[in-house]
Each structure stands twice: as structure tokens, then as C-alpha cells.
Amino acid sequence: MSTSIEQPLHVHFSGLDLFKTLSIVVDDKEEDLYAILWGLQSAGLACVPLRYDALTGLQNSTINELPTARLVFLDLNLERAPTRGSSDQATHISTVLRELRLRGPYILIVWSDFKANLDNVLKTAFERTPEVVLPVGIAVLHKEKFLVGGVEGEYDFQALGEHISQIVAQYPQVFAMMAWESRTATAASTVTQNLFELKEPVDSSTVSSLLAKLQKEVEAMPPDASAPVISKPLYPKDRISKIFHSIGTAACGKHTDEDPSAAIDAGLLPLLEDKFLSIPTDSACCQTWQSVFNEKGAGKLEAPVVCKLNSYLLIDKLEGTFSHRGLFLELNDTPENTFLSSYLGENREALQRHFFDKGKIKNLTANGQAARANEIISTCKIGMLECSAACDHAQNNIGVRLGLLAALVPEGSANQITSAESFYHEGEGLKIHFGDKNYILIVSYKYPVGLPQHLIENRTYFSPLFRAREQLLNSISVRFSAYASRPGVISVFEK
């Protein structure tokens, strides 16, 4: 197999450290596996080669523990003598896709000599694995086209790398996010590096003496003894541990020992964000994003897509465990639920009307559309949005939380919503997709309430629908602070 590379092709991805982006190659021939491996590395990409056996499947039984790949190179012929278009071929491909457990987005690159019928095999394979996420694109590389002088196993890595570069360039959206993921990984590794630089410096003589000591311990072992782990760190464990604990304590105080993982997250995430934002983007990265934006076309996003995008960016659907901070707590619809009337002095219908323009609702009724007015009011979901300070949650101060009266108004009632400055809304409204409908989220600043923690937890009066993410909470909180501290008239006098 040829291993010569005339010129490293990573220059095509200058400034974008895609070596941190995982690619996967699946083939049943070791020589082909390493051929594509060399080609990927010549293009500046990292690669995990996985050999497939028709009897035992993928060689790595823990493949599902690998990070999600963005490029997947798959040989279409995963047995030595395939029958063209055979059902067995589709079965092998289905097995591979099922074991990889890809979550996307990924580009599927078929790397094969095409002794099988391409379209039939892939179509059947995907039909047999409906649970598999489909690729965002498919590309083809013909093995025989990259042979040097037609010699089996001798590949032109230069040409292979060039073609891989051209394939990736056809998907600037995926490529741009690969670069973004790489920058995130770089920022995280920089934070770790900076923390360990706070240790005492170690010179080469210390390393040499420790290595000599460890070597003597290995040589002193009995010949029949099992191999133990002989290792010693070259950094003060207690100092690094104190540094980590201090970071957690600074973020969460005395509660660091109760939930150390959350405390470290609270302490290190601001550092991660700072490192990420401080990484300069070069011209290559800007050109990639420019190519992405050039393909956006004219006009605006469709309304349903905007709602789903807002939902993704601004709310959390409460999958798995979740924090109580930012919860939208819908008022349970039961006659005995008197929470709002007890705390706010208004019944459910009055508070629902609170979110609509009184004049417009009155006009509907006056024009013989009373049923429509009642429908608008009754379909408005009301509840409380938990808006306590982040530090209260980080330090686990159980007690009373700040709640603001909030509502979900069906999109069709948007033109009836109040435009008063005492409400949080964006233009025509902050549209989100929840359940199977589109709603507009509105928050009122006129009814701040102290929510006892037990009412949030025991679901007696409220049911959590979703959690507002940090950026939405921050926007709501800033405007609430401005509203709550607005100046009033102190005195009126004449000169």
C-alpha cells in the first residue's frame, strides 16, 4: 500500500481544527480501511477505522460510546464475494447502521467498488432500520478510481484527500458546524490546561528520576506476577483538588459538597464561554459561514419553522431531570384550585382577560362575535413563570421563589393581545411550538408572586409545561427590573 503524501491537504481547512471532528470508516478489508484512514488524515480529519465481519459484525462492541460522527465512510460490499444487489448485502448495511447509532447530522460517503446494486442495497437497508437517523447527504467514492497503476491495495492518497475535501465543501452547513464544534472542544481543553498550569512546575530531572524509580519497581516484580498499575502523578493532587473545590464554592457556596458536579458546572461554564469567545476566527472560517449564508435564499423563514426554532432556542421540553428555575407552571384546571384568586385577588377568567386588549375584545362582542371573544379568552393557558435569581438555585436556597403571571395564547389570537409596556412580548409575540400547536408566550409584570417551593414540587396547583432557557429568563428579568423600578411622580408644584 502506498503511503506517500506529496502535500498535506489540511491546508484546505486552514484555521479550522477539524482533527477534533470524528469520522468513521467501515470496511471488511484492512488494507482499504487504512487507505481511507490515510486519506482522511491527509485532509486534516480524525478517523476511527472499524472492521466489519459478516459473522461477528463490527469489531468494536462499544461503538455506541463514541461521539457522534459527522462523516461516515461505508463500504457497500461487506463480504468477500457479494452477490450483486443481494438481500444479504442490505442486511450487513442495516447491521452496521444499527450498531453505529448515529444521531446526525452526518454525511454518508459510500466507499466501494460497487459490485452490488447501490440504490437497491441502500434503499432496503434503510427500510429495515427505520429507527436510524438518515444522513443529510450521500456521496460516492469509487475505490478503483484511486488505485495507483491499477494495483490492488495501492491507493493515491493525494487524490483521495482532494476528493474528500471537495465532498465536504458541498455541505457548508455541516462543515461550518464541524468547525464550531472544534472551537468548543478547543475552548474546553484550554480551560483544563489553564487550571493545571496553576500547579508547581516540574523539571526534566524530576521526570527522569521518577521514571527510573518506576522502572525498578517493574523489574523487581516476580516473573509470574500479574501486571499491576505502576504510576505516580507529577502534580500535587491536593492542590488541584483545592482549586476545583474553591471554584465550586465560589459558585455554589456551602452546597458544593452536596452536588459537586453542578457546582463545578456553575463555576467552569463562564470560563468556557470566555475562552470560546476569545478564540479568533480566521478568514477561512468566515468564508465558510459566508457560503452558508449565501444559500439561505430570499424571504423569511416560514412561521411554523420560526415557532419551532424559538422553542429549541428558548425553552426546554423537560426531558429527563430538570431544574425548577424558569419553569412555566400551568394552573391546574380544577374548581377547587383557588391559588390565583387567593394570591392575586382575581379569578381565572379575569386573569385570562388581563392579557388581551380590552377595546378589541369589547369590539368583537359589540359586533356580534361574542362566541369568538369567549373562545379567545378561554383557550389562553395561564400560569406562573418561575423567575428567581440564578444564585438562589445554584446555592440551593429552598424557600420562596419569584413567580410572574404568564400565559400561552394560541397563535390565531395574536392580534387581540395587549401591547401595554407592563407585559413582556416581542413585536407580534414570542411564538413557540408546544405540543402540536403554536403559541405566543406573554409575561405580565403586574402580578409578581412569592411561590412557596413545595407548591412547585408537589403539583397541587400547577403542572410544569416547559422551562425557559437562560437567555429568555435574562431578557424577561431585565425588563421586569426596569418596570419594577420605574420612576413615579413624587410631587407636583408650581414655580
Image (cartoon, helix red, strand yellow):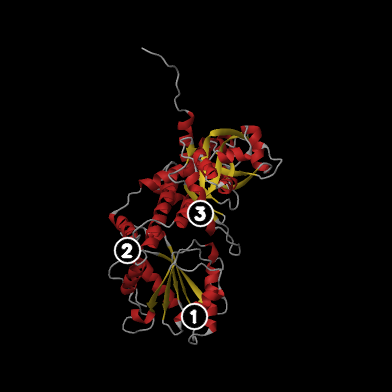
Q: Mark 1 = which residue?
A: 121
In which quadrant of the rendered view does residue 397 lie? top right
Tell me the crowding category of disc 1: few under 14, some 14 to 19, or many 20 or more residues within 10 angstroms, Cα based.
many
Q: Mark 2 = which residue?
A: 10
Circle nearer the N terminus (3, 2):
2
Q: Mark 3 = which residue?
A: 214
Specify whether residue 93 is in view: no
At which x and y percent is residue 248? 53, 39
At which x and y percent is residue 61? 56, 68
Marks 3 and 2, how far apart at CA: 40 Å
**Nearer the observer, 363 or 209:** 363
At which x and y percent is residue 455? 66, 39
In which quadrant of the rendered view does residue 154 lie? bottom left
Report the number of discs: 3
**Nearer the observer, 423 or 474:** 423
Circle nearer the N terminus (3, 1):
1
User: Is 58 drawn above or below residue 484 in the view shown?
Assistant: below
Q: Secondary structure at mark 1?
A: helix
Q: In the image, 142: left or right of 459?
A: left
Mark 3 and mark 1 in contact? Answer it, CB < 8 Å. no
Q: Secondary structure at mark 3?
A: helix
Q: Can you tell which of label 1 and label 2 is closer to the viewer?
A: 1
Q: Mark 3 is on which residue type?
A: Leu
Circle nearer the N terminus (1, 2):
2
**Nearer the observer, 83 or 431:** 431
Q: Mark 1 is on which residue type?
A: Val
Specify whether residue 368 is in view: yes
User: Is 42 drawn above or below residue 381 in the view shown?
Assistant: below
**Nearer the observer, 311 or 62:** 311
Q: In the image, 77: left or right of 13?
A: right
The residue furthest right is: 336
